[in-house]
Every structure is written in C-alpha cells, then in structure tokens.
Image (cartoon, rainbow, N blue to C red):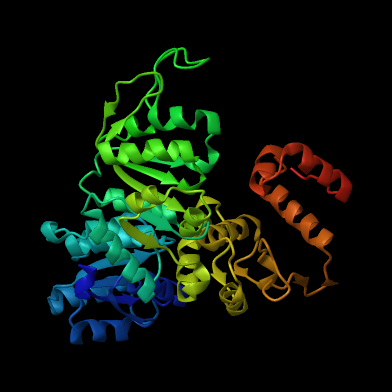
Amino acid sequence: MASKKKKILVVDDEESIRDGCYQTLSRRGYQVDTIGDGLQGLDMAIKDSYDLILLDIRMPKIDGIEVLKSLKKDHNISAKIIIISGYGTIPLTVEAMKHGAFNFLTKPFNSRELIQIIKEALYMDEVSQKPEEEEHLFEMVGDSDYIKELKGTIKKIAKTDSVVLITGESGTGKELVARTIHILSDRSDKPFVPVDCSSLVENLMESELFGHVKGAFSGATYSRDGRFQRADKGSLFLDEISNISLSIQAKLLRVIQEQEVPKVGTTLPDKVDVRLITATNKDIRAEVEAGNFREDLFYRISVVPIHIKPLREHKSDILPITEYYLEIYKKKHHSKVRYLSEETKKSLLAYHWPGNIRELKNTIERLCVLCDHEVVTLSDILYYGQTIDTKAPIVDMFSGTMTLIDVEKAHIEKALRHFNGQINKTANFLGIDRKTLRMKIRNYGIEIKK
C-alpha cells in the first residue's frame, strides 16, 4: 500500500511528465524518484530497489524498449514496469509486453488513469491489502498535515454509526466528506440521500423529510415516502440543517431518538434505520443562543463533530487541488491549457478564496474553457469577489490597463468562441440567462462567429 512507501522511478525526457507524475504520486504517499535520461534511469533501476518503474519509450541515447530488455533479461529485476509513450501503437504494446512490461500507458494521461494503473500493478497480488479506502478518499486532494488528519478522522468515524455534524464555510467540501463517510461505512451498499435544507419550501419541508399519505393536505393525491424512508438502512445527509424551522426541529429530534418517522396525515410512524449526517456553514452554537436552533437537537446531532477548515487556512493544498482539477477539465473541455506560469501559481496562493474549494474548482474550469494557449498567465485568471489587495492583475500587457467593461466583453467573447456561438451553452456556462447574454452581446457590439 501507499502507506508502506512503495518506491517508484519515473524515466521520461519530458520535464512536464516527470513533474506531473511526481506531484500526483508523492501526494498519495509513494516515494518517487525521477530522471530524464534513459541511461541514467537504467543505472538507477539496477542499483536501487524499486517496486515500479514508469518508463518512456522515445528518449535520446537509448529508448525505453532497450531499457526494458536490459532490466528484465540481463538484470532480472522484480519491479513492475509500465511503458509510457505518445506513440501508442499496437506493435509497440505487443513488443513491450513480450519483453516483460506490466502495462502500457498512452500520453496524454490524467492523474486518475495514472493512479489506476499504478494500483493495478502494485496491488494485483495483494487483494487483502488493496487500498480501497484510499480510492474513496482520492478526491480529498492535498498533502498538508491537516488533510492527512482529516482523512484519518473520516476513516475512524466511517466505521461507526454515530451521528455526525460537519461544519465549515460554503465551498469547503462538506458533502464530499459526508459521502466519503458513507462510502467507507458498512452501509455503503445502501442509499446515500442528500438533502439541501435551504432549498426546501417551508410548508412542504415536513412532507419532504418524513413523507405523507394520500389526502394529508391539499394536492396530496397519492402517498409518498420522505427522504428518511428513502435512506432506510443507508445514510441521510441534511445539509444546512440550521435552516429548518423550530417545529420541524422538534419532529426531527423525535425521529433521531425513536428511529420512527411520523408521516404527514397518519399517526402510524414508519420504523427506519438511518445513519444521520448533518452540516451547516453557520455558527450553530450562536444559533442556539439566539433561540433559532433547539439546544437538545444540537447535542443530538453533534455526537461526532468535524470542522472543515477554509482553504485560506491550508494554503499548501491550493496547488495540488489546482493540478487535480486542471487534469480533469483539460480533458473534459479539450483545452489547450497545459501548464500554469509561476506568476499564476503565486497569484493562486495569494488569493483569499472566499468561495473555498468550490471557487477554486470553478476558476480552473473557467480558464480551461476560455484560455486558448498552453501556458496560463495572470491575465487568464478571473476571480469572483476580487478585492484590491488580492485580485489577480487583469492587465493586457500589450494594450494597457483594461476597464471592467473590457474584461467582461473579452470574457463573453472567449466563451462564445469556445461554444461556437451557441447562446444556450454560453449563457449556462457564464451563469446568466439567454436574454441577459443577448443584451450584453448587443450592447458590447460583439460579433458572433460560428
């Protein structure tokens, strides 16, 4: 397993490949060495004991097939070898396998593909030790002590049936933590039912949570299960629980105590077996003191509290998270983006991130859609909620300072180009309706080129 510090050697003459593999694998606990020269890589592989070698085919001085032959035939090393190449042809694959390669990875590949093939190579003979938990914790990216501690806490909590209260600012990943707890629990094969309490209409909240019988109220033309019944034997996640009314809080308290759900319109409750996970971005103790939240319910839902720190308090994870989503959105949007400039990285680290990981994720997706060149520069970054102290420069180095109108116009033009002038898709991406987009196009004199 990764926790045993499996040793991996990356031999590739492309610095970006070496760096990408190093970042992805070292974050997951592997000990990683990299080298850009095939002959030096061969020497390192012979002298040191590696568990796995990632080996490029096309390199100066000596190609990967020759290195593979030497390692397996002449030196009989036990390390699993995965060939990586931009020339993913069947003959090369067959030849590599014939000479002892474990598998073949074609460039460009993303971090998910890399991790998957590494796991297949390292753990195929260790079924009982296969790192299934690490697979489910995969999206919790970061290598800070805080992230490691959070993952450890989740593993411990998941094995119990205790009620969990997750607190943290908007965008910190509270639902991801809740889902991970469920997936790692003994209830993983049963439903995980998320409920956004802030989106439930007040007069229908009771019916949504507990269900109703036919005729219970006007419009109830048939009986319906609530979220609790749907989550039976599984987990129910109540997000923004501080938004539910005091009357619903009283009923919820009884449900937790009795494990019985009072359907609207009947005195016969449904028996349920539900693991309850709740979350809020408010100071729930302050809500209790203000009389907005029942104190007895607070103690019932906070048996095991987890607080998720805002991104600004674990800044060392910003770049690993950035790289993770960059890999995802480059592929999804067929983006030309390949790397971030050093100035861009500094800007990402300096920014306050009021929207936390959600905002970072959206920022990376936006630049993958709109950036039409390989290296992301400061002028490609557009933050929401910018302040004078933290905003990224939005200066066009060739034409001088841009006005806010110039920035918005350029932003819309890039989006339109990316979506080939399709109004619906562009408006959806920009987060505005079609009417507003058409008005801006007209006002800015934007020409739509399809």
Report if residue 21 is visible in the image. no
Q: Is residue 341 above or below residue 191?
A: below
Judging depth in this view, the residue of 72 and 34 nearest the camera is 34
**Total numbered circles:** 0
Q: Is residue 56 above or below residue 177?
A: below
Residue 134 placement (x, y as % from top left)? 27, 61
Judging depth in this view, the residue of 173 and 41 nearest the camera is 173
Q: Is residue 197 left or right of residue 37?
A: right
Report which quarter residue 367 is drawn in.
Answer: bottom right
| Residue at 51% across, 61% down | 357
Q: Is residue 287 left or right of residue 70?
A: right
Report if residue 8 is visible in the image. yes
Residue 426 placement (x, y as % from top left)? 68, 44
| Residue at 47% across, 60% down | 168
Residue 326 placement (x, y as % from top left)? 51, 62
Q: Is residue 264 above or below residue 385?
A: above
| Residue at 23% across, 61% down | 156
Split into 4 quadrants, where in the image is the C terminus? top right
